[in-house]
Amino acid sequence: MTAGPLYRPTDPDTSRDAAVLALETAETLRDRCLQALRAAGEHGLTDFETAEIVGRQQTSTGKRRLELERAGLVAPRLVIDPQTLALIPDRRPTPSGATAIVWVAVEHQRANAGGH
């Protein structure tokens, strides 16, 4: 799921080693995020909730979730807007009081698309 080279040919060995370690970490974290989203079922998770479950920062899990979204493995949890009756992404409060999109594994999105 990565694009481009991991390091430049001119980078020192330590940078090359760090790039390989980061790739391994990203793959592992991506798998853990997908596992958490699948386990959450139709309820789904925000990036903050995923971060709490996998024990990493929201910024890290958000990047991995974006990769999962681009790969077609996760999607926003859709709910019906009571005013327009349109399907919209579900949102839940974050620790700061803002709202965040709720994400689900795609196999759960289809089951939930018509319900709230």
Image (tube, helix red, strand yellow):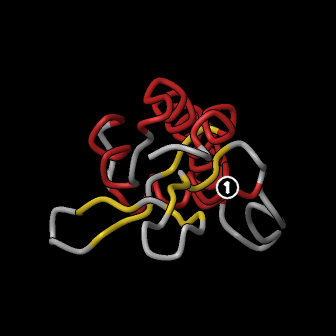
Q: Residue 105: image x %, image y %?
A: 61, 38
- In the image, residue 90 sits, relative to residue 42, either above or below, namely below
Task: Give left or right: position of 42 versus 47.
Answer: right
Q: Secondary structure at mark 1?
A: helix
Query: Can you tell which quarter of the image residue 108 is in?
Result: top right
Q: Residue 104: image x %, image y %?
A: 55, 42
Please name the residue that numbered disc 1 is placed on. 67
Query: Can you tell which quarter of the image residue 53 is in?
Result: top left
Task: Give left or right: position of 21 versus 54.
Answer: right
Q: Nearer the viewer, residue 109 or 10?
A: 109
Residue at the (54%, 60%) spot, across then down:
63
Query: Can you tell which quarter of the image residue 92 is in?
Result: bottom left
- In the image, residue 116 sits, relative to residue 47, either above or below, namely above
Q: Residues within 10 Å of mark 1 (few under 14, many from 20)?
A: some
Number of numbered callouts drawn: 1
- In the image, residue 103 sits, relative to residue 85, either above or below, namely above
Task: Give left or right: position of 43 versus 80.
Answer: left
Residue at the (50%, 55%) spot, across then down:
79
Q: Nearer the viewer, residue 113 or 109?
A: 113
Q: Residue 42: image x %, image y %?
A: 49, 34
Q: Residue 37: image x %, image y %?
A: 50, 35
Task: Give left or right: position of 94 versus 35.
Answer: left
Q: Nearer the viewer, residue 107 or 94?
A: 107
Query: Amino acid under label 1?
Result: Glu
Residue at the (35%, 58%) spot, across then down:
58
Of all residues, the one furthest to the left in this rendering is 96
